[in-house]
Amino acid sequence: MNAVLAGEVQLVDLHVAAVDRRVIQRRGAYPSGFACRLPQLRGRDDNSLTIFYEGVRGLEAYRESWPAFFQWQKQGASFEIDELEITAGDNVAFAHALLRCGTQEQFADNPDNRLRLTLGLRKENGQWLVAHEHHSFPLAEPATEGEQEVRQLHQQWFDATAAKDLDGMMAAIADVVVSYEHEFPLQYIGVDAVREVCARNLDVPAVTLDVPDLKIVVRDDIAVAWRLNHVQGELPDGRTFDSWSRGTRVFERRSGTWLLIHQHLSVPHDPR
């Protein structure tokens, strides 16, 4: 028997016999980009209740809720099942799922976020109908002002690196910074020493810096940021390079301005 959310869109094939009661787990039941046109809604109970962020009852109200979603999807959003579990009896069933639902930018900002989906179904005349739907995102804590400022500071570094703007790269470095760089010596103390390292790294035709999935924790006037640094560029002889390293950075807010006071960069050590 087929569970049909709306019209021609086949969400889940329950595969239950009349006397079976079992739990079925499947992945990838939704085809990528399935919601590409307004469904005819032939497979929903006329009195079904769908909960988005406000209650929606009945087929017509449900139909009216989809166009905005389609428009959002056209802008690059995806809607893909990550986990799905179904429990079915003779005449009633329910399914719950976690889905990747969002744009590439949203996934980059919060890669672990998932849409939660619950469906209640009943069988009428041999066909499964969706009688209830509830989907939601967990409430996310908004980024603090300090976190946004430190994240913006990183973006300024990324932009200044691509532009080979040494002064821009050094604008948020504290005079007394201590930096553990990839190369010797063991530590670089003071903004002038760090400036020399940065200048050497810009001595190539092109270079970019990025820290995908950057993590930031802020407490009062101290912030810590960490993740993997991704550096790409071109050497003077035309060869390209693409490298990853580990990076942890500590910031202090002084007179309302965030400054880097410590940086630790490294690559894994192979003892062989």
Image: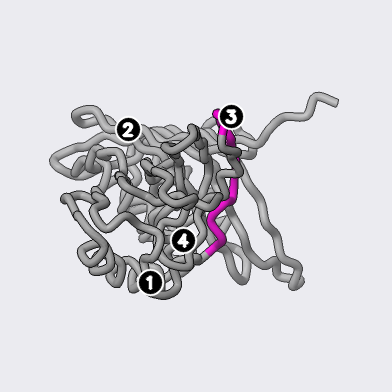
* Image coordinates for residue 127, horizontal then vertical, percent: 47, 52
Foreground pick, 14 / 51: 14
For the residue marked with disc 4, what is the amino acid? Ser
**Residue ID for mark 1:** 40
Whether the magenta-drawn stretch holds residue 26 is answered as yes
Which one is nearer the viewer's eye here, 244 or 113? 113
Secondary structure beneath disc 4? strand
Of labels 1 and 2, earlier in sequence is 1
Residue 78 shows which numbered tag?
4
Which residue occupies 36% across, 41% down? 120
Q: Answer with left or right where residue 57 lies relative to residue 94.
A: left
Q: Is residue 99 magenta?
A: no
Magenta stretch: give its range. 19-32
The furthest residue to the front: 125
Query: Residue shown at 52%/40% (left/top)?
Result: 84
Q: Nearer the viewer, residue 107 or 122?
A: 122
Q: Badge 2, how many Cα within 10 Å: few under 14, some, many 20+?
A: some
Q: Which residue is mark 2?
A: 217
User: Which three-letter amino acid code belongs to the residue tagged 1?
Assistant: Gln
**What label sits on residue 186 in the rendered view?**
3
**What SS does tag 3 mark?**
loop
Q: Nearer the viewer, mark 3 or mark 2?
A: 2
Residue type (three-letter) at the residue carrying disc 2:
Val
Disc 2 is placed on an element classified as strand
Left or right: where does residue 123 sit relative to residue 253? right
Q: Nearer the viewer, mark 1 or mark 2?
A: 1
Residue that appears at 44% across and 52% down = 125
